[in-house]
Amino acid sequence: MLVYRGAEGGAHSQAVCSSRRRKKSTGDLFQKGYRVRVGHPEKEEPEGVCHSITAAFGVVSYWGLRFLRALRLIQFSEILQFLNILKTSNSIKLVNLCSIFISTWLTAAGFIHLVENSGDPWENFQNSQALSYWECVYLLMVTMSTVGYGDVYAKTTLGRLFMVFFILGGLAMFARYVPEIAALILNRKKYGGSYNSTRGRKHIVVCGHITLESVSNFLKDFLHKDRDDVNVEIVFLHNISPNLELEALFKRHFTQVEFYQGSVLNPHDLARVKIESADACLILANKYCADPDAEDASNIMRVISIKNYHPKIRIITQMLQYHNKAHLLNIPSWNWKEGDDAICLAELKLGFIAQSCLAQGLSTMLANLFSMRSFIKIEEDTWQKYYLEGVSNEMYTEYLSSAFVGLSFPVICELCYVKLKLLLIAIEYKSDQRESSTLINPGNHVKMTEGTLGFFIASDAKEVKRALFYCKACHDDITDPKRIKKCGCKKTKNTYNGYIKSTPEPPLLQSNHLDSALDTSRGQQSVVPLVNNRKGSLLPPPRKRHMVQTEDGKRLQRAQSLPVKYRYHPSNRQFEEDQHSALSPKKKQRNGNMKNSPNSSPKIMRHDSLMIPMNEPIESMDENVKKYDSTGMFHWCPSKDIERVLLTRSEAAMTVLSGHVVVCIFGDAKSALIGVRNFVMPLRASNFHYHELKHIVFVGSLEYLKREWETLHNFPKVSILPGTPLSRADLRAVNINLCDMCVILSANQNNIDDASLQDKECILASLNIKSMLFDDSIGLLQANSQGFTPPGMDRSSPENSPVHGLVRQTSVSTGANIPIITELAKQGKQLPVISFSPDKSSGTSIQMITELVNDSNVQFLDQDDDDDPDTELYLTQPFACGTAFAVSVLDSLMSATYFNDNILTLIRTLVTGGATPELEGLLAEENALRGGYSTPQTLANRDRCRVAQLALYDGPFADLGDGGCYGDLFCKALKTYNMLCFGIYRLRDAHFNTQSQCTKRYVITNPPYSFELVPSDLIFCLMQFDHNAGQSRCSLSHSSHSSHSSKKSSSVHSIPTANRNNRNKNRDKQNSRQIS
């Protein structure tokens, strides 16, 4: 029996006779205010008896409780999942939250509608109020949000009691569900869309380790103003949404940066960022992770996923460990010829530090060259002024003008420096097989062809355009290089941007250019040595096909029958005759005497790969002797057990160690390997003669060094002293006060969460060494008559004599300058120049370079500097002096490689000592160098440039050391010795002209022509390989065999003032006659 109360308040009874009423809308049902009354009705119609009985037992079909059907909405997400509509976790979560919230809301509103329209039973239903269902929905929303306007409220006791309990659960649900629903909806719109490319604008995808630090460093270099207009949009893809700081960084660069949330391992996300149309994909690595191998594995998986989706995409990825680069070769679509590159941070970091052992400060100079720095002008005459002027220089590439065709490299280099104010250090050729080769300071034998790409050091990309626009007819009489613009006398060809990686195919040489390239003076040959190509492969410079038809056609054909990477081409018959005559002892002696005169221009003899080199004895060609690795790029020796190279303190104290390299390394059995092989390889490059190799002594944990020894056992002149770098007894045992360089490394830096404590071991070791005092700086060199050969050196070799030479002491008490001859005098060989060691009575005079992880920790290395803790690393004194190096400076290589992959090739060639893809393949197979026989092809690979330091206190350039011009030194070194100068390593207080000067030096990159020199300067130069080591040119190079004190440097050589004035007048006259 169902009873309802009418609008007038009268009671009416009605039997449920028709089922059509059950189909009424929910709103109509609730508006009639149905309720149940148990028992007999007061008045009953006869025809409704049966229906009343049915209604009495059919309470479950009561229309007033049908609002409970809204609870079925909770299963709405399951239905959509069954229909395969919901697939992602975010969409499922969003539908779940919305269905629970809406169903609860509607159900509670239905209950309030029922009780408010019915009234309380104990009040005989007299306190009801007429509320529509939607008013109840409004009431419940206002109640859940705790607003409570009061315009609609519950009057019944049941309604108010329900509101008391509902407000507790409803408020909690509202506070939890609504923000989550809003976050899901907003995030989907903010970072879940797809990239829409702009017509005419390229874009790159950056993924991997995306943090505020990595992104800010990348954008600062990528979007630097010196790169001109960078019309490239950067799309970041990461699976974690950015924090507020990173989001603010994206907003500051909103015109060129977009962020999308996703993973490169998901093909759907790769499609969202349009990876198939991207110009490149850059993968950043976490340099500070605790497990470098795991980080490399993650990046390799990213490369596999991207290459699997689009094999033609160009990928530039960062790798932490050198041995993990081999896994990239297993990817079928990985192709370095198409621009794919792997920047190994460990390889470059340790290579930079190793080069600093040969020329201190080089790591700072190279790091500044490929990093974009804004020019900071300082008016005061301080060392920062000259340092920052050099910091503003960067490395660029540009095609050379047709006006340079047919000229030799030194002539073009001099013309660019004097007239165009550009420093040309290398060129790139392309052969007929489209194999590019990079020649660093190649010498007189190389003639320029059309379409040659040059590597320049300049402060702006616009300045480098002068090399492309230069025209002899229009610009010959121009003295201001800024006026050299694109001329209209002829149509300029090949106007390519310096950032574009593709180069045009150089046309064939004209006949007159070919003749000029073949015509060389007597005694000089024009054979071009094998050089590193753009990725390090050994390839010859291009020679044209019709050269085979010359007099030397037969020999050239025999040379060309070799594999491409081993081809080697002589130029004329005169050189062949000279090489045959070089086998004669008399002729050989006569040629050597001619080269001993530093005042005459030496003719650099280069050996033919099919002939015996004139500087190598006949015994070196014995096929049973292996002195170099199979590629001929590094010195090699048979593998040795680690026990043979171990030193005890007593043995180390008896060992005559001088001019060596001490490597203080922190690590244990659980530390991640840092790959010390990358540090040793540049110091064992084959362009050094064996007697020029510096002995390397490792001081550290034996457990750690045993794990590294597998990659070091094929290198000569390596010893190990088990101990700790914090022990002064161990440091004194290895004669650290007589070393050429002390390197401090740590393998434990990434195991500490606190960033300020990551470098604690390196900082403590550095301060420990600087605080050491050495009363008798020569006493440790007093060997007994029998001598002691350091482990790792062959006693049978005369070059491995335990006593390396004569030691003379002028004043032991004062620790005065000690001349040391570091080479044994052998019959028929000229003694090298005597190098003077500074006053090393204190550890502060020891040349040292320390590796840092946290840039801000550089403030703790020097206690006497005034660097602010917030100062950028490149502006701090330790970095400017070359005594500190941080891996963060290598971040700039990502953007530099994208704009110009030739820059990475040049850096890798200079830093690694000659590592090639072929060598990387061999290391991937055996994890060790493989010895090779000394064949003419492998010996030819030794003929390549290396970095050295030229001292001005003595020698043929001494007259320019006291007040001379850097430009005069540049031209003289280039013309006379084919040495290319590119910077100065100067004492910090040299401009003060005081008696007591600081021994610290700083780097000056590419000084201007009129820059004044001082006698204590050391000049960075690219030096040709010397086939007659120990003769004329050996005396020119300082090469970091010892550091020079300010006392000795300032008093060694002095030029009268009158002579200096006359030289200045002559220089002014020469400058007035510009180079034509």
Image: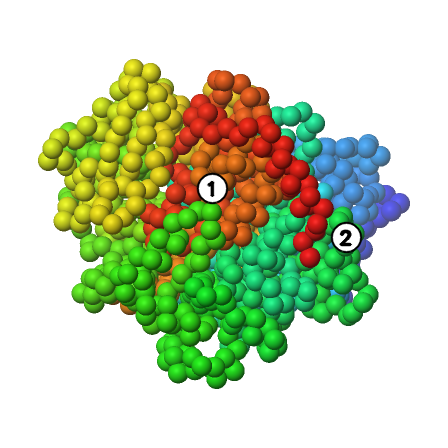
**As drawn, 338 above or below 348:** below
- Residue position for label 2: 478
Mark 1, residue position: 956
**Residue most toward the right?**
8
Relative to 516, 854 lies left or right: left
Q: Is residue 971 left or right of residue 559?
A: right
Q: In the rendered view, would you say 747 is above or below 1054?
A: below
Q: Position of residue 118 (x, y in %)?
A: 76, 43
Identify the residue shown where x is 55% and y is 28%. Answer: 1056
Q: Which comes before the other along the chain, label 1 or label 2?
A: 2
The quarter in which the N terminus is drawn is: bottom right
Q: Disc 1 on helix, strand or loop? A: loop
Residue 406 picture quarter: bottom right
As drawn, the label of residue 1 is none
Dividing the picture into quadrants, the one containing residue 659 is: top left
**Where's residue 691, x and y in %?**
28, 47
Mark 1–mark 2 contact, CB under 8 Å?
A: no
